[in-house]
Amino acid sequence: MTRFAIVRHGQTDWNLEKRIQGSTDIPLNSIGRAQAAETGLALRGTHWDAIVTSPLTRAHETARIIAGELDRPAPLVVPELTERHHGEIEGLTFAERQLRFPDGSKVPGLETRQAVLDRVLPALELLALTYPDRQIVVVCHGGVIGTLVRYATGGKRPAAGELIPNGSVHDFRWQDGRLELEAFQPVR
């Protein structure tokens, strides 16, 4: 069994403005850097065998800060962990999205949750095979984490109003060829 602490990257200016980032490469702001350091400190009580990250700057910088706090080597970049592609709504606020695309399922270029699973689950499986019976910090994005939580809970979570905050840690394990949720840390 391989354990994953799946971390959402720290805050960006677009998070603060409630803009949809998707695969747009937005850097952390100063609050996001502080959140990454706090997350690293919170993870200190456990030995982590590896730290992996999405290639997007906000996740990669979060992972580098966490690695520094944990005195671990530089994180390994896993391209499949990139955020869900949001197509034509990237850069819009949630209010602007609702005005422009009231039926969210018809957004041009929006990656389906199934497509996210189809790229992220094999990447996690490969990590589990590469690091059997180890513990890995995975730094990625709210859309990826939400998709994994939905998958692992059969769609029961995240429930309405449950948010995945910047810097939050969610515990999963890869066991018997599948991903299982151990602890989901949402905010209401």
Image: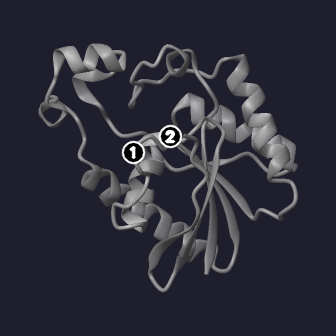
Residue linked to disc 1: 160
Q: CA distance from mark 2 to mark 1?
A: 8 Å
Image position of 154 with respect to 115: above or below: below
Looking at the image, which residue is at 58% across and 42% down?
Answer: 187
Give the quarter of the image for residue 63. top right
Q: Residues within 10 Å of mark 1 (few under 14, many from 20)?
A: few
Looking at the image, which residue is at 22% across and 35% down?
Answer: 110
Residue linked to disc 2: 163
Amino acid type shown at disc 1 = Ala
Give the quarter of the image for residue 4. bottom right
Amino acid type shown at disc 2 = Leu
Looking at the image, which residue is at 44% across and 81% down?
Answer: 177
Could you say whether the residue bearing mark 1 is in a helix, strand or loop?
loop
Quadrant for the N terminus, please: bottom right
Q: Count how many numbered circles sit on residues in the image.
A: 2
Give the quarter of the image for residue 156. bottom left
The one nearer the camera, 6 or 65, is: 6
Looking at the image, which residue is at 62% across and 75% down?
Answer: 2
Where in the figure is residue 161, as x and y percent of width and height? 44, 40
The one nearer the camera, 139 or 129, is: 139
Where in the figure is residue 114, as x and y percent of width and height? 26, 55
Quadrant for the C terminus, please: top right
Image position of 172 with respect to 29: above or below: below
- Residue 61 placement, left or right of 113: right
Where in the figure is residue 81, as x and y percent of width and height? 47, 48
